[in-house]
Every structure is written in structure tokens, then in C-alpha cells.
């Protein structure tokens, strides 16, 4: 009887085991199926991006072009899609990502470039400075800048300085006003900049003493008759000893088709091309030939307006071939210091408005801060050494801070490496917030407007003749976060047609 009961029990347990085993297998199969479907879905999403990229690269207008493209998942660094991602190319202004990221990492967002005013003699009871007044530049690009001053207030800081000097009791300077911009050296422009660029506004080079964005406004009166010569009516600011050779003609078409030719420190400018016929006051912007000299000139003017007598002629450290530095100024009296804009604010303006001058200043400031040498070469060495410790920079060549040099050679994977490093670092949020947003702001405001990428892409753009590039971050509809870079050189279609093709890729990533 007991044996029979035992058999019944064993049989019942076997039935239960079979039931639970079947259920477990069904559950396991369900999980495997779900995993398989999710995997296929993820792969399908990735394949959609790769397909969009492959179709982009196969375009007839890109048959002879050079393309480098890379998309990574920021959660794990995995490649989502790629095309010649390690091919290095000139990138135009997208290179500013390197200068702005490096400045945030090395200087910090609260660092402020400082300009110092010194006297090399005593101030007597009658208010006479028996010596010279020195302006020691600290590489502050915000002094009198239109990006930091409202219109008409560009000279306010000079009047504030004049008030400070008068508060020190100075009524007369027996010597000269001497401007010292030696902190950044005197190359005038980074190596690799083209002759056609240096005289124009976007070719304004960095200086230890930058003023008014190192720009000059040329105002032309253009006759109504096509082909007639224009007349240069004014320069703002007034530049002492500048000779302008005007060859600008009136044209029937609209817009500015003029070019300004001239090298740094050269007081000759040649203006060619055409401007719209019938323009009574057409303004063309060019680079300031000698910011250091202009700075001394502007301060001298304001001091004289304030009633301060100056006996000597203005001078510069460059013309004196002076080797100044901390030991030199230790012998002088520091009268006051002027603290410029925060690096974080300069980075914001640089990336949103794509300001070449600011990007160059950031590179020079990094070099000076780390080595005491504020030249472009020093800053670029610091930049490349810093990032080479984070990832391989083999084959990458950065020739300037702004991307204006066509000698720059940067790959899409170099950009995604940088973007990933910044994303996971202490300055990640600050860096991303500095980037223009697609369809919304800055140089990205017309990209993907009212499309899938609208508001989901924060990126830096770059554009020069036969070069267009983008690099930045995508917050996709799925919740995933991506870093991407797309560089194209030597396309045969128009810029607008190329942008249309690029937007297809951007929108596909954003929908992922």
C-alpha cells in the first residue's frame, strides 16, 4: 500500500515538474524572443543611420569629394555608424571645438584675462608722472568688443581707466604711453592663413592687446552708375598713418563683394571688388593692422579728452624691440588691473557666433598660462599634448584656433573622441551649453529647422570654400545620446544642396 502511494506521489511530482518545465521554457523562450527583437530593433536603428550615411556618400555630387563621418553612442562609446572616420581633413570653424574645450579644461570657466597699467616713475604732488605709462596686455579679447559692449559704449572702459588714473593724482605724463602686447608675440596671424583672408574682418589676428575686436569699419559712398569708382568716406576707428588704396567699383548686384588685402603691421590696405550701386554709406569690415599701437592711441585720446597732458609720443613694445616680462615690470609701479570677460563667456560667444579672433585668443591664453609663452605655436602644443593623454591624436594636425587655416587636418573620429571626453568630464554640461542648437540658435538656427533634428542637435558648424563640416551632440527621440562629426571637402554641389543632404543624416540620427 505504501509503495503504491509512493508511486502515485512520484507520478504527481513528475507531472508538476513537466508542467513547470514547460512554463519555464515558454517564459525563457519569450525572454529570448524579446531580446532577439530588441537586438534586431537596435541593429535596425543603427543600420538606418549607416544606410543614410552610405546613401549620402554615394551622392553624385560627392563622387570626387573627401568625406569623414563618425557617430558614437555616448553611453558606451560604441560606433553606431561610420565612413572614413579616421581620414583627416581641413574642417573650417568646427576646429573651434578644440580651442574652446581646451580653454575650459585648462583655464576653467571663471578665468579672466587681466590687463595691467604701470608707471615707471614717481607721481609728484603737482600730479606729474615723471616717466611713462605702460599698458601691459593680458590677451583680453573683450576690451571694447561689440560682443560684450552695447553700441556706442565701446570706449567706456577707456574712460573708466582715465578716471582711475586721475584718482591716482595723475594730471600730466612727462613721458609716453607705451602699449605692450608682447604676451602673445608678434606673428600677427597664425601660420597657414591665406593672404586673401588676413585683411578682412574674419582674418583679424590675436594680440596681447586687442581692442574693438581688432576691426576697422570702412564706409564707402557708391555711385549709381555701374562700373564707377566708389569713394571711401570714413574709417572707424580712425587709424593713424593707414593708407587705403581704393579700387572698389559699383555693381548692379546686391551684397558685399569687396575684399581687403593687407598684412599684419602693414599700414597699407588695398580694397578691391564691388559694392551695390547707389549705396550712400556701405560699411565693409577689415582687420586692424596694429592693435598694440591702436590701443596706445585710443587711451592717449581719452586721457587728453579728460584733460591729462602727455608730453611724449606714444610707443609700443614691438617698435622698441623690448623683451618685457615679470622681471621687467617688477621695477615699475602697478597702478591698477582690469579683469576681462570670463573664459566661460568667451567660449559661449566663440561657439555660438563662430568668432575667429576669440578662438585664437583662447589658444594663446592656454599657451601663456601653461608655459609663459603666449604664441599660437605654444598654445597648439599645449592643446595637442593635453588631448593626446586622453586618446590617440595620431595624424591630427591643428594649425590654428579658429579653423581658418587650410593646413588643419582633423578626422571625424578625432572630433567624437573630443566630444566623448568632454561629455564625461567636469566641463561637459558647460561645453554642450555653449554650442548652437539646430533650428534654434547661432550658426545652427537654420539647420534642421522644423525637422526631426530641430532642438535635438547641439553642434558647431564650419564652412569655407569647398569645405563644410558639423560636429556635436544629438539627444535622440529614443532617449539615447550620440556624438557625431561630418566633414566634407570638394563637393561639386552648392552649399544649400549639400546642407539638404547632410540634414537627412542628422534627422536620421535624431530619430534613432
Image: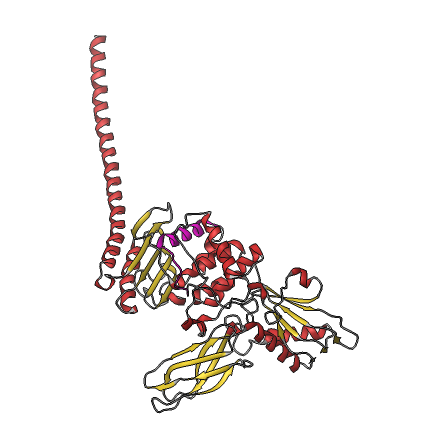
Residue at coordinates 40% horizontally, 61% vertically from top-left?
Answer: 407
Which quadrant, please, contains the N terminus? top left
The spot of residue 215 in percent (x, y) is 49, 75
Q: Is residue 57 or residue 324 the one in the foreground?
A: 324
Q: Is residue 423 magenta?
A: yes
Q: Residue 230 is drawn in which quadrant?
A: bottom left
State which region is magenta.
404-425
Q: Is any atom of residue 110 visible in this view? A: no
Magenta span includes 52: no
Residue sitting nearer the eye, 189 or 436: 189
Q: Residue at x 48, y 71 (%)?
A: 204
In the figure, 511 relative to 119: above or below? above
Q: Is residue 480 above or below residue 30?
A: below
Place of residue 19 in the rendered image (x, y in percent of width and height, measured from the top left): 21, 26
Q: Is residue 127 left or right of residue 429?
A: right
Answer with the quarter of the image where residue 2 lies: top left
Residue 491 in view, yes or no: yes
Q: Is residue 101 left or right of residue 26?
A: right
Amino acid at each position: 500500500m505504501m509503495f503504491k502511494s509512493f508511486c502515485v506521489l512520484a507520478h504527481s511530482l513528475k507531472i508538476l515538474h513537466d508542467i513547470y518545465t514547460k512554463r519555464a521554457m515558454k517564459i525563457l523562450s519569450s525572454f529570448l524572443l524579446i531580446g532577439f527583437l530588441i537586438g534586431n530593433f537596435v541593429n535596425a536603428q543603427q543600420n538606418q543611420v549607416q544606410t543614410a550615411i552610405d546613401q549620402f556618400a554615394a551622392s553624385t555630387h560627392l563622387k570626387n569629394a573627401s568625406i569623414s563621418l563618425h557617430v558614437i553612442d555616448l553611453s558606451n562609446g560604441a560606433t553606431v555608424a561610420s565612413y572614413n572616420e579616421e581620414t583627416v581633413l581641413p574642417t573650417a570653424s568646427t576646429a573651434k571645438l578644440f580651442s574652446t574645450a581646451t580653454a575650459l579644461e585648462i583655464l576653467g570657466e571663471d578665468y579672466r584675462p587681466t590687463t595691467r597699467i604701470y608707471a615707471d616713475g614717481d607721481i609728484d604732488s603737482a600730479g606729474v608722472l615723471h616717466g611713462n605709462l605702460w599698458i601691459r596686455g593680458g590677451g583680453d579679447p573683450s576690451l571694447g568688443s561689440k560682443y560684450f559692449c552695447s553700441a556706442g559704449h565701446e570706449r567706456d572702459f577707456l574712460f573708466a581707466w582715465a578716471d582711475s588714473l586721475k584718482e591716482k593724482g595723475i594730471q600730466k605724463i612727462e613721458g609716453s604711453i607705451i602699449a605692450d602686447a608682447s604676451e602673445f608675440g608678434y606673428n600677427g596671424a597664425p601660420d597657414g592663413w591665406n593672404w586673401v583672408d588676413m585683411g578682412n574682418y574674419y582674418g583679424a589676428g590675436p594680440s596681447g592687446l586687442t581692442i574693438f575686436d581688432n576691426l576697422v569699419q570702412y564706409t564707402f559712398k557708391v555711385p549709381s552708375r555701374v562700373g564707377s569708382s566708389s569713394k571711401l568716406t570714413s574709417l572707424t576707428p580712425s587709424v593713424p598713418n593707414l593708407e587705403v588704396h581704393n579700387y572698389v567699383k559699383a555693381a548692379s548686384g546686391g551684397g558685399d563683394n569687396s575684399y581687403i588685402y593687407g598684412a599684419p603691421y602693414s599700414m597699407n590696405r588695398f580694397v578691391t571688388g564691388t559694392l551695390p550701386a547707389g549705396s550712400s554709406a556701405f560699411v565693409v569690415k577689415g582687420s586692424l593692422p596694429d592693435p598694440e599701437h591702436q590701443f596706445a592711441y585710443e587711451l592717449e585720446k581719452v586721457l587728453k579728452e579728460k584733460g591729462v597732458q602727455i608730453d611724449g609720443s606714444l610707443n609700443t613694445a614691438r617698435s622698441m624691440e623690448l623683451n618685457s616680462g615679470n622681471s621687467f615690470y617688477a621695477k615699475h609701479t602697478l597702478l591698477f588691473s582690469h579683469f576681462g570677460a570670463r573664459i566661460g563667456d568667451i567660449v559661449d560667444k566663440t561657439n555660438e557666433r563662430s568668432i575667429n579672433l576669440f578662438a585664437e585668443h583662447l589658444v594663446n591664453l592656454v599657451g601663456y598660462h601653461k608655459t609663459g609663452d603666449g604664441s599660437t605655436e605654444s598654445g597648439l602644443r599645449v592643446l595637442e599634448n593635453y588631448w593626446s593623454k586622453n586618446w590617440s591624436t595620431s595624424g591630427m594636425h591643428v594649425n590654428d584656433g579658429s579653423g581658418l587655416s587650410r593646413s588643419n587636418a582633423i578626422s571625424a573620429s578625432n572630433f567624437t573622441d573630443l566630444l566623448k571626453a568632454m561629455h564625461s568630464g567636469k566641463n561637459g554640461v558647460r561645453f554642450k551649453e555653449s554650442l548652437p542648437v539646430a533650428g534654434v540658435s547661432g550658426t545652427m538656427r537654420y539647420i534642421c529647422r522644423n525637422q526631426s533634428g530641430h532642438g535635438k542637435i547641439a553642434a558647431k558648424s564650419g564652412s569655407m570654400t569647398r569645405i563644410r563640416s558639423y560636429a556635436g551632440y544629438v539627444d535622440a527621440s529614443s532617449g539615447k545620446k550620440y556624438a557625431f562629426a561630418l566633414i566634407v571637402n570638394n563637393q561639386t554641389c552648392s552649399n544649400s544642396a549639400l546642407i539638404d543632404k547632410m540634414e537627412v543624416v542628422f534627422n536620421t540620427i535624431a530619430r534613432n
